[in-house]
Amino acid sequence: MKELLELSVARLKRLAALKAKIERLQSQLAAMAGNAPSAPARTGRKPRKLSAAARRKISLATKARWAKVRAAKAR
């Protein structure tokens, strides 16, 4: 405990940041291993639903954008 009292503020901040990073990495590791607690359910807004026409518009716009990219690459 005495060692913590003798550390500078900058060093204490760095120590706290490292501890937080270690905790984040451990939770990511646990999630990858499959033994992480389940994610909390999303609350709040409902997912937005697009109409078929809106999905089609987005699809056509995306295809047109990629066609431009491919055409520019072919030059």
Image: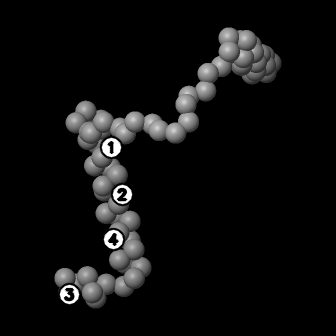
Distance CA(mark 1)–CA(mark 3): 33 Å
Task: Label 2: state its secondary structure.
Answer: helix
Position of residue 47 in the picture relative to residue 42 (left or right): right
> Which numbered disc flags the more N-terminal residue, 4 or 2?
4
Task: Indicate the amino acid at tag 4.
Answer: Leu
Confirm whether residue 63 shows in the render: no
Task: Label 4: state its secondary structure.
Answer: helix
What mark, if any, has residue 15 been given in the picture? 4
What mark, if any, has residue 28 been given in the picture? 1
Q: Which residue is mark 2?
A: 21
Position of residue 27 in the picture relative to residue 74 (left or right): left
Q: Residue at x 30, y 36 (%)?
A: 38
Disc 4 to disc 3: CB gap under 8 Å:
no
Position of residue 34 in the picture relative to residue 70 (left or right): left
Disc 1 to disc 2: CB gap under 8 Å:
no
Residue 11, by quadrant, is bottom left
Specify the quadrant that holds the C terminus. Answer: top right
